[in-house]
Image: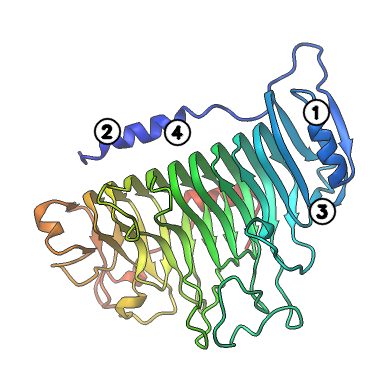
Amino acid sequence: MPTFSPGRRMLLGSLAALPVLGMAGPGLGQVLPTRLVRSAAELEDAFRNAPDGSRLLLAPGQYDQARLSARSFARGLLITSADPSSRAVFSQNLYLNGVENVTITGVDFTTARFFEHQGRMDKVQLGLTSCRDVLISDATFTGYIPTVEEGIDPESPDLERHFALAGYTRDNGLALVECENIQAEGLRMLDLRTALTCGSCERIRLYGIEVAGAREGVNFLDTRDLTIAECHFYGFKPWLAKASPNRDHPDMIQYWAGTKEIGVHRIEIRDCLFHQGPGLPWTQSIFGHLRNRSGQADKASEIYVSGNTIINRHIWAIYLGEASQVVVTDNLLLPSPDLPDDPEQINTPTISLEGCRDVDVIRNTLLPFQGPDRPIRADKGALKDGRVRLASDNRFLDTRPVVPNFWRKVTPDLASPAAAYRARRGWTG
């Protein structure tokens, strides 16, 4: 048995303990208080005065910036579209601050025009700060892509990542800051600079989320008890201009050290599909390190990466740095199909575990990093002294077409849980 098993049970137990979010059911014969709103200003007023356990129905149309703050609902509050066939759309952004027990479902977020970002949160379509017990479901987030007239030439020298570049996305979809017990489920996140960010948060569940056409996927720091499950990341469009030394560093999922030095703990990434298809630029799939942390204490622990399918053209398919109590199991890592039979090492997805200890690597399928002596990437001596334990049931593929273990003969698991979730929702692409 992997030594991580007790931590694994603790992780799943902590996630199972999350309370069910949403509306409390009305008593027999009781009708939920309901108010129809038609503008962002009306929504703000309705939220300030909403009775506990009520519903706010958004009339069809576009809603500009709205801010909802400092309300807690013991029986919940529901915000949804009045007409499911003609959903309300937030055309700029919606912010929640200090809000508890609210459900937002069946509304969309689409940046309608080009505007200059004035601050860090100004570019966020849905931002939550200091919120608890919030459910966000059944929503589409679509960013705005500047035209040649609106944006800067992406091949110009000395550009920065935050600049508005012609032809490249610039909005952030969902941002969580200092939040607790947030669930996001059934979200489509399209054409975004960063789909989702999570900082200084606890008990976050991201389930059945599709991220496509983005420059970055899910970024998190100083976060505990985070699950990313049955999500699909594909077709990323990172800015990789050679003219500028400050080009993008694209990641589908990424963690790093934060200023609060909380680190990342009890992280589960499972049953996801990462797919960067033929002809598309490289991205890193699952990448994280804490090299910029202060002190020597462990700042990443209990990380579980399981059942994921990764098809990409970069070495960092699963890169976990400075972490302890780690399990990497049942993952399939394959090069993009348009690469040569024997792709260069930088283009060959692999497992990397730098600065890690107490790690189990079990039942994964991938091309070896440097052959039998170093099939995965780890610190010198880590495979011999037990800091990284490589089980005998890992399957290492071959680059020679004549052998049965040739990597092109392995069929990607496109019927994975992530793909099955998309099919149930009727999502195509």
Identify which residue is drawn at 15% across, 58% down.
Answer: 382
Element assignment for label 4: helix
Q: Provide the residue designation for mark 2.
A: 6
Q: Provide the residue designation for mark 1.
A: 50
Q: Provide the residue designation for mark 3.
A: 64
Q: Are marks 4 and 1 in contact (CB under 8 Å)?
A: no
Name the residue nearer the viewer: 399 or 326.
326
Q: Quadrant of residue 225?
A: top left
> In the rendered structure, which disc, 2 or 4, sits on the residue that comes first in sequence?
2
> In the rendered structure, which disc, 3 or 4, sits on the residue that comes first in sequence?
4
* C-alpha separation, residue under disc 3 versus residue under disc 2: 48 Å
Q: Quadrant of residue 135?
A: top right
Q: Are marks 3 and 4 in contact (CB under 8 Å)?
A: no
Number of numbered discs on residues: 4
Tell me which amino acid carries mark 1. Ala
Identify which residue is drawn at 80% across, 22% down.
Answer: 32
Q: Are marks 2 and 4 in contact (CB under 8 Å)?
A: no
- Foreground: disc 3 or disc 4: 3
Q: Provide the residue designation for mark 4.
A: 15
Tell me which amino acid carries mark 4. Leu
